[in-house]
Image (tube, rainbow, N blue to C red):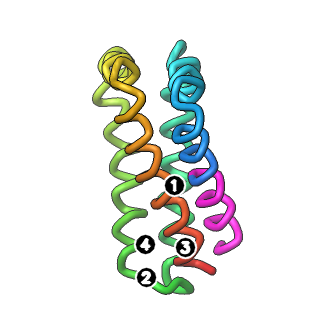
Amino acid sequence: MTVFVTLFGAAIAGLGMLGFVRPRKFVNFVESIWQSRRGLYWAIGLRVVLGLLLLAAASESRFPQVLRVLGAISLVAAATSPLVGFVRLRRFVQWWSDRSTGLVRIWSLVTVGFGMFLVYAVW
């Protein structure tokens, strides 16, 4: 399981780097995902997979309690996303995409840090 968490973390960090280096391109990428309800289903599926992977890899990690909490948060986020609904999530993405490139870069750095933490935690 740790290999999959490492790959997931590297992908998250890579997306964060894209957001830092090319914030408008990243925003366009995120917006393109939310053009249809399929994006919501992908987001739910990815959250479920990440949550389960984090829970499964927790005991082998450097930070088992942290990974268990993050896994639980990911699963709760997956379960509540349909309750929030596609329209509200789409509005949030639109609000986020209207922010300055500086804010996108800051959040992208947080994303890079999160991805790198996941890699470090299981490697």
Verify CB contact (< 8 Å) between mark 1 and mark 4: no
Whole-angstrom CA distance, mark 1 to mark 2, is 21 Å
How far apart marks 3 and 4 lie (CA) works out to 9 Å
Q: Amino acid at mark 4?
A: Leu
Mark 2 and mark 3 in contact (Cβ < 8 Å)? no
Name the residue that disc number 1 marks. 112
- Asked where in the image residue 73 lies, by quadrant, the reply is bottom left
Earlier in the chain: of badge 3 and badge 2, it is 3
Decide: few, some or many residues near mark 1? Use Cα within 10 Å; few <14, some 14-19, many ≥20. many
**With respect to residue 123, does 20 lie above or below?**
above
Q: Examine the image and state in which quarter residue 93 appears.
A: top left
Under circle 3, the secondary element is: helix
Q: Which residues are magenta?
A: 1-12
Q: Are marks 2 and 4 in contact (CB under 8 Å)?
A: yes
> Badge 3, how many Cα within 10 Å: few under 14, some, many 20+?
some
Judge from the rendering whether residue 117 lies leftward or rightward of residue 94; answer left or right. right
Disc number lying in front (3 or 2): 2
Tell whether position 7 is magenta.
Answer: yes
Q: Residue at x 57, y 51 (%)?
A: 12
Marker disc for residue 64: 2
Please give the residue where the numbered disc 4 appears in the rendered image. 67
Q: Earlier in the sequence, mark 3 or mark 4?
A: 3
Question: What is the three-letter code of the residue carrying label 1?
Answer: Val
At a point 60% along the width and 40% down the height, the residue shown is 18
* Label 2: how many Cα within 10 Å (few below 14, some 14–19, many 20+): some
x, y percent for residue 60: 56, 86
- Specify whether residue 9 is painted magenta: yes
Q: Mark 1 against mark 2, which lies toward the viewer?
A: 1
User: Is label 2 in a helix, a strand or a loop?
Assistant: helix
For the point 63% across and 80% down, which residue is it?
123
